[in-house]
Amino acid sequence: MHDIYEFYCPFAHIPGFYEWARIHSPAYGSFDCFIIIHNKDTAKPVTVYVNSDIGARYMRNRYPQSLCYRVSPESLKLHSEAEGRTVVGHLEAAEGPIQRVTMKFIAGGDVPPKESMYGGDQFFVWEVNIPAAERILNCRRK
């Protein structure tokens, strides 16, 4: 028997605060999500926006303790550019703590992404060391 793993691509985050991910699950399929981490303790429930029924079902079955908001595919978009060195996420929502957010992550040419284990104090997954001047954040909370 073989283990089957989920993977996340594209993925970008501000450690301990926000994550953008396209989750690819063999059991559920692929969907985009925006995750709000309420504190740096990853054992605490998070708030998640998903852009499909697949994502809503995944969250309901896998992480029922988390708050999940379903938005349309047009309202939650995630894409990468420049061979993954730029990740752009956009969310517009009528419900939940965030009304609108757009984030653009740009990795400098001399900073290679590295694959890391998720969790712990460093919040590594697919970490890109993004200088603050190159990170664009536009977020409106309710």
Image (cartoon, helix red, strand yellow):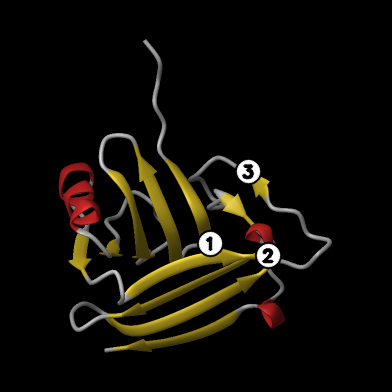
Q: Amino acid at mark 3?
A: Glu
Question: Mark 1 = which residue?
Answer: 12
Q: Secondary structure at mark 1?
A: strand
Residue drawn where x is 44% and y is 63% of the image: 20
Q: Amino acid at mark 1?
A: Ala
* Residue nearer the viewer, 56 or 65: 56
Question: In this rendering, does residue 17 appear at all?
Answer: no
Task: Name the N-terminal-most of marks 3 and 2.
Answer: 2
Task: Name the N-terminal-most of marks 2 and 1.
Answer: 1
Q: Which mark is residue 82?
A: 2
Q: Is residue 102 toward the left or the right of residue 75 in the image?
A: right
Q: Is residue 118 toward the left or the right of residue 67 in the image?
A: right
Q: Secondary structure at mark 2?
A: helix
Q: Position of residue 86 (x, y in %)?
A: 63, 67
Is disc 3 in contact with disc 2, using a CB cutoff of under 8 Å? no
| Residues packed near mark 1 inside 10 Å, few (<14), some (14 to 19) or many (20 plus) | many
Q: Position of residue 6 (x, y in %)?
A: 40, 38
Label 3 vs label 2, nearer the camera: 2
Q: Secondary structure at mark 3?
A: strand
In what quadrant of the picture does the C terminus appear?
bottom left
Q: Compute the Cα span from label 1 to label 3.
A: 12 Å
Residue drawn where x is 18% and y is 57% of the image: 53
Question: Mark 3 = which residue?
Answer: 115
In what quadrant of the picture does the N terminus appear?
top left
Quarter of the view holding residue 117: top right
Label 2 vs label 1, nearer the camera: 2
Q: Position of residue 31 (x, y in %)?
A: 33, 55
